Image (cartoon, helix red, strand yellow):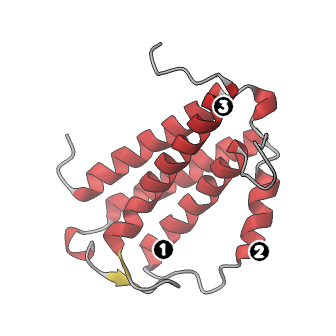
Amino acid sequence: MPHTLQDFLADATQKAAADLEAALLRLPEDKRNWSPEGEARTALDMVAECAILNGTTADMIHTRTFPADFDYAKFGKAKTQLAQDWNALRSLLQENTARAIEAIRTVPDEAVGIEVAMPWGPTTLARIMAYPYWNMGYHEGQINYLASMLGCLTPPNA
């Protein structure tokens, strides 16, 4: 059982990554890059977001700064490109999740309340540490919704 916030978030982040991947793999392969309408996001696009941002979050935990050179347009292009190659995407998700977990585990208890300047206002390091867990769980739900639309959502252990 986790004894610190860092332990909890590290373990929860690992489980969220596994659950996110399982949700994606429940979709038929030909529907993983499917959009239900117009500009709606695909499952692979959501997983690509998580893969990239887990690495960005690991860096922010270590540096305690938002990347000054973060470019939303480049991020969008990187996400789109990554979503085209499941093997590369899976590899980056695993790599950056491991980096995020390592970063979370290295935060001393006395640092979790430190505020980091973000574009939308100051955010505690604790909230930044929670981001990969939250974001992957959020997107798991969206992917499961796509699966329910396609009639392929099955509960775990069913």
Q: Which residue lies at the image location 61% right of the left edge and 53% below the top edge?
A: 51
Left or right side of 113 for 75: right
Q: Residues within 10 Å of mark 2 (few under 14, many from 20)?
A: few
* Secondary element at image label 2: helix
Counting from the top left corner in percent of width and height, residue 111 is at: 26, 75
For marks 2 and 3, the one nearer the N-term is 2
Q: Which residue lies at the image location 36% right of the left edge and 45% below the top edge?
A: 12
Counting from the top left corner in percent of width and height, residue 100 is at: 47, 58
Q: Which residue is mark 3?
A: 149
Compared to residue 53, the image places residue 122 above or below, namely below
Q: Which residue is mark 1?
A: 60
For marks 2 and 1, the one nearer the N-term is 1
* Secondary element at image label 1: helix
Of 89 and 39, which appears nearest the observer?
39
Left or right side of 10 for 82: right
Counting from the top left corner in percent of width and height, residue 122 is at: 39, 85
C-alpha gap between disc 2 and disc 3: 30 Å
Three-letter amino acid code at disc 2?
Answer: Ala
